[in-house]
Amino acid sequence: MMRDAAKARGYGTAALASNCSAVEATTAHGRYRVECRDKDGRLKWTDDIENLVTTVGKNDALDKYFAGSGYTAAWYMGLISGTSYTTGPAAGDTAASHGGWTEDQNYSAGTRPALSWNAAASGSKATQAASFSFNATTTIKGCFLITNNAKGGTTGILYSAGVFGGGDKAVASGDTLNVTWTGSM
């Protein structure tokens, strides 16, 4: 008796070959928009500042977003003085230790202006204008964003800081600075 035997074997290979470079990178950054008006409300100058987001600021944002720890919505705007400025801002700056810069406090409010926020859109979020009414002539170097409202306060989270790229800005007594900040990821 003759038997036909057929053995069926299946071989399958699957390979995923990819030379794809689709990478999405996220970097925290922001921009201050500063507008100076004289005592009569006339526009004197405007300027933009590209800011640096500090390491403690990035860590704070990551902890609050991903771990949900210690969230606060209280943010304040401050001004960097052009007087005695030597260096900065730097990634390692904190509210207590920020290299070669100091805060300019020559405005009439008793505390740093509180920030109000617009809704996030297209991957960015902006503040409404923080207003500084000056009671002395001074020189402004830049701006910073912090969680402490005390003028000269050294606690809280220093999120970002930046200086004018084109040099210091003179502000006269009676002038008002309106500052907004827009951040994106």
Image: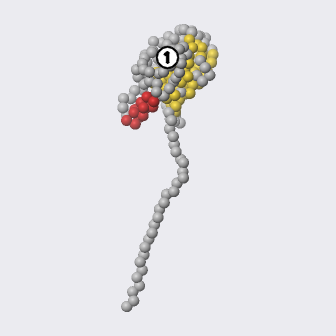
Q: Nearer the viewer, residue 12 or 85?
A: 85
Instruction: Check the image and report above or below for 137 versus 19.
Output: above
What is the quadrant of the N terminus in the image? bottom left
Q: What residue is disc 1 on?
A: 102
At mark 1, the secondary structure is loop
Of residues 6 and 115, the one drawn nearer to the viewer in this rendering: 6
Tell me where residue 52 appears, x and y as whole percent: 52, 28
Residue 174 shows in this picture? no
The reply to whether residue 100 is visible in this rendering is yes
In the displayed structure, does residue 62 sit left or right of residue 25?
Answer: left
Crowding at dot 1, Cα within 10 Å, few <14 / some 14-19 / many 20+, comes out as: some
Q: Is residue 95 left or right of residue 45?
A: left
Of 86 and 81, nearer the camera is: 86
Amino acid, disc 1: Thr
| Residue found farthest to the bottom | 1
Q: Position of residue 42 (x, y in %)?
A: 63, 14
Question: Residue at 51% of width from left, 14% of height from top?
Answer: 104
For the point 53% across and 29% down, which residue is it?
30
Identify which residue is drawn at 51% across, 35% down: 27
- Nearer the observer, 80 or 106: 80
Task: Tell me residue 94's x, y (percent).
Answer: 44, 24
